[in-house]
Image (cartoon, rainbow, N blue to C red):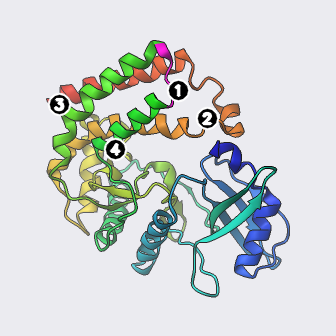
């Protein structure tokens, strides 16, 4: 299992890989970050410079898809958009690979090195804060439109249907819940699919919730963690910021869009995608976690994942979201 193979990567192997690839001398201290998707380590050079090394989960993204992420970050950095771009080695490369010997075979891990950037969580409350938030996303999207990411996923109901097929084929759904999950998804996803035919698709952050936005005193807002960047309608990076369903957040959404449109026009008709996107995100998280179910850290944090009670709750959430979609006349 890929999750178990990932456990071959020790902190010592990570330190050695970074030192060799970037011609650095580290002080030997390693600070693991609480990430079970990738392996992320805080490091420090012998002269005190703090760095973060991200080792990407094997099999999750192709090398080309990781290059798309780095290209987007480089484009944003050149446009002076506040992101944390990966560092280059002496040849200008930002993406590297290390091979680690296991008891049965060798496994390769792609990795990148970033400067450490601190900050505090940013929870917009005032109109001005929502405006600022919209403005930084608008700047990011203006750059996102300038280039394609052909090796990245495209956010659409067809992708969610493929996730459903994966869940069913992997036999991770409790037998008592399988039919209900399948029926619900096959009723909702094809019904909303036509809504996704007209919007403009572009590079977006993809996981733009408030936990991925930091406030740095004196510097402003900072967008972090582009690991899930994708091709999607722009609204994908806006709805996740809202504290509730869009119909309960009209003031926040208005200010968010006002800030956004200082830099790039927004397709207002795509607001109808918000509730379908929320349904699709639930499906995405189910398959995302299913792929990590063999990871020791994941099992320790989510011991009840995959039980009948777990699937019953998830189906209830999907059903409630289907009702929200129907309430907007989309089903």
Residue drawn at the location 60% of the way across and 76% of the way down: 87
Asked if the residues shown at circle 2 and circle 4 are in contact, with their CB atoms under 8 angstroms apart, the answer is: no
Mark 1, mark 3: which one is toward the viewer? 1
Residue drawn at the location 61% of the way across and 35% of the way down: 293
Magenta span dominant secondary structure: loop
The residues bearing labels 1 and 3 have C-alpha atoms spaced at a distance of 32 Å
Is residue 316 visible in the rendered image? The answer is: no
Against 143, is 122 above or below?
above
Q: Secondary structure at mark 3?
A: loop
Against 24, is 189 above or below?
above
The residues bearing labels 2 and 4 have C-alpha atoms spaced at a distance of 21 Å
Name the quadrant of the C terminus: top left
Against 279, is 316 above or below?
above
Q: Which residues are magenta?
A: 170-175
Callout 3: 10 Å neighbours few (<14), some, many (20+)?
few
The residues bearing labels 3 and 2 have C-alpha atoms spaced at a distance of 35 Å
Callout 4: 10 Å neighbours few (<14), some, many (20+)?
some
Asked if the residues shown at circle 1 and circle 2 are in contact, with their CB atoms under 8 angstroms apart, the answer is: yes
**Residue 173 counted in the magenta span:** yes
Residue at mark 1: 172
Please state the horizontal and vertical placement of residue 106, each as a whole percent of the image: 73, 58
Mark identifier at residue 212: none
Residue at mark 3: 328
- Based on the displayed image, in which of its 4 quarters is residue 302 positioned? top right
Q: Secondary structure at mark 2?
A: loop
Mark identifier at residue 293: 2
Among numbered discs 2 and 4, the one appearing first in the sequence: 4
Please state the horizontal and vertical placement of residue 153, each as a whole percent of the image: 38, 54
Name the quadrant of the N terminus: top right
The foreground one among 231 and 247 is 231
**Residue 144 counted in the magenta span:** no
């Amino acid at each position: 299992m890929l999750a178990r193979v990932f456990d071959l990567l020790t902190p010592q192997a990570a330190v050695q890989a970074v030192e060799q690839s970037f011609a650095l001398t580290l002080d030997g201290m390693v600070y693991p970050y609480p990430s079970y998707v990738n392996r992320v380590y805080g490091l420090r050079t012998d002269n005190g410079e703090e760095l973060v090394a991200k080792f990407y989960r094997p099999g999750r993204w192709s090398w080309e898809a990781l290059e798309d992420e780095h290209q987007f970050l480089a484009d944003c950095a050149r446009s002076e958009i506040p992101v944390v771009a990966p560092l280059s080695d002496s040849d200008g490369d930002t993406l590297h690979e290390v091979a680690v010997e296991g008891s049965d075979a060798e496994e390769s891990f792609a990795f990148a090195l970033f400067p450490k950037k601190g900050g505090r969580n940013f929870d917009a409350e005032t109109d001005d804060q929502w405006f600022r938030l919209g403005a930084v996303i608008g700047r990011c999207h203006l750059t996102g439109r300038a280039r394609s990411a052909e090796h990245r996923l495209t956010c659409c109901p067809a992708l969610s249907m493929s996730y459903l097929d994966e869940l069913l084929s992997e036999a991770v759904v409790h037998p008592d819940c399988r039919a209900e999950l399948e029926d619900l998804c096959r009723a909702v996803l094809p019904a909303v699919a036509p809504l996704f035919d007209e919007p403009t698709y572009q590079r977006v952050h993809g996981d733009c919730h408030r936990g991925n936005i930091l406030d740095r005193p004196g510097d402003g807002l900072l967008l972090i963690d582009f690991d899930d960047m994708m091709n999607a309608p722009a609204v994908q990076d806006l709805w996740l910021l809202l504290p509730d369903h869009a119909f309960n957040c009209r003031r926040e959404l208005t200010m968010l869009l006002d800030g956004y449109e200082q830099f790039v026009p927004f397709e207002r008709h795509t607001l109808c995608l918000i509730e379908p996107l929320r349904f699709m995100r639930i499906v995405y998280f189910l398959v995302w976690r299913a792929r990590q179910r063999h990871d020791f850290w994941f099992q320790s944090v989510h011991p009840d994942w995959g039980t009948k009670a777990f699937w019953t709750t998830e189906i209830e959430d999907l059903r409630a979201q289907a009702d929200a979609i129907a309430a907007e006349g989309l089903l």
